Image (spheres, helix red, strand yellow):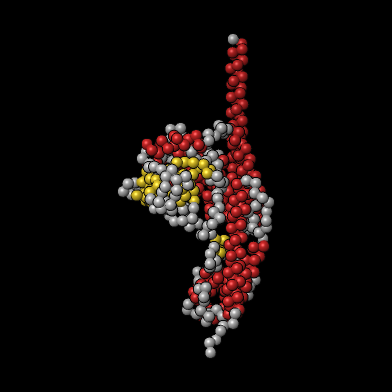
Amino acid sequence: MGRKSQSKHSSKKNTAKENNRYIQNRKELNVLVDKVLRLTSFFQNLSNPNKSWEHHLEIETVLRQIINIETVYNSKSKPIPRQAGIQNYLKWLCENGAQYDGIQISEFEGYELGLKANKDFKEGSLILTVPAKVMITEKNAQDSDLSEFIQVDPLLQNMPNITLALFLLLEKCNPDSFWKPYVDILPEKYSTILYFTSDEIALLKPSPVFESTLKLYRSIARQYAYFYNKIHSLDIPVLKKLQNIFTFDNYRWAVSTVMTRQNNVQLADGNIAAFIPLWDMCNHEQGKITTDFNKDENVGECYALRDFKAGEQIFIFYGVRPNADLFLHNGFVYPNNEHDSLSLILGLSSADPLRELRLSLLTKLGLGGVTHFSLYKGDNPISAEMLAFVRIFTMKEDELKKCSEESMPSDLLDSAANMALVNEDSERRAYTYLITRCSLVRAMYKTGAAPHNLHSKNVKLLKQCEVDLLEGAIEYLNKQLQNINQPTKVNM
């Protein structure tokens, strides 16, 4: 009897210790979350790259502490390999009306899972259909227990992608979820920048994607802190369900799932954000959009973008997007991306005595507040807006005044500008400036160490694509300059 009493006493003591530890952890978390909220509300001097980087390191340090605490009382069971859920997933799809004859889910080197053709498909032939009922949409979230929170939160009302992320978290932790077979086959983690270490992010320099990465990381950190406070302060039933599952690790997983898999679909309810099972396992290839929603049948349809032979991986085209976008939001880089572009920052000096005159002319062209201009892949890599800016930037005072007096300064946007507005000397200065600017940016890209993981491999690939864009632009600009410098032949 004495032993039994001692055992009960010991059990109560352990429970009390666990409760105290939980309370202490929660207090520490509250302090750290408030710190993240303060840090991500601080935007002064972030235009300075060094300050921006220091600020990121502060945020990352606090988030690491948060992850360590959350891991203690949110211990995860060993993840089940995605492959183990394939049969159950396909059975669920079949039972709910999906049609995918002639394809199977397979592993592909460098891609993880994808879709493989088991028979030949001709270009334009129907590959698969996905019923609307198996899609996870923002409408599902609005009709769920989450609706009460959506009604009082302006962020969720204006950002369906975040709504989708929170709904996905709820479904992931719901053993009775209708979408459980789909959620079970999602990756455990992603190659998005939310999973990059600070050392891996630093490898991005001098790419303009470096700053974009810091901004995106800061934004997601702020969202986490914002929703953590809401979840632990508002008296809404669904938020009780989220309290023990809303961790930074889980939130970045849900956000990454949305970034890599969300699509806008024209359903009967209108154009809404959605996950489309099976279809979202297709990887990207250059081509054309070959997917559509059949309103009559209430299904999404995917057609072959080219001929696929039996045994080949089936690809789809994700749309016209540069590698910077694919890297940031999908976690990969497409080397042969004919829609690739590179952003260059150009601006007027505050010390320029002709600043107001230049700014006035830029404003007439709709470029008054523009600081980012694009270089493109292809035969004409210089955007019209960039060329117009540089023409105005390099003009002398009399040239600026002459252009300002013209009723059609929009001619400055034309690559073969009206010489009444732009003379050869002015064009020579503009192209020379652009060659110098692109060459200086190109010189900043140094050969780094060999990639040691997928993250560093993607960074190296992204930077190589940017170097290719710069070198292509320099070659084009030099040819344009040679044409300007060649004397005009006069026929006698």
Along the line of sight, the residue nearer the viewer: 312 or 420: 312
Q: Is residue 154 above or below residue 4?
A: below
Q: Is residue 380 visible?
A: yes
* x 56%, y 84%: residue: 489
* x 50%, y 56%: residue: 321
* x 56%, y 64%: residue: 375
Q: For residue 372, what is the image quadrant?
A: bottom right
Q: For residue 210, what is the image quadrant?
A: bottom right
Along the line of sight, the residue nearer the viewer: 280 or 21: 280
* x 58%, y 24%: residue: 15
* Percent of width and height locating residue 304: 42, 51
Q: Is residue 81 above or below residue 417?
A: above
Q: For residue 204, what is the image quadrant?
A: bottom right
Q: Is residue 287 above or below residue 275?
A: below
Q: Is residue 370 visible?
A: no
Q: Is residue 316 above or below residue 487?
A: above
* Percent of width and height locating residue 291: 40, 51
* Percent of width and height locating residue 13: 61, 22
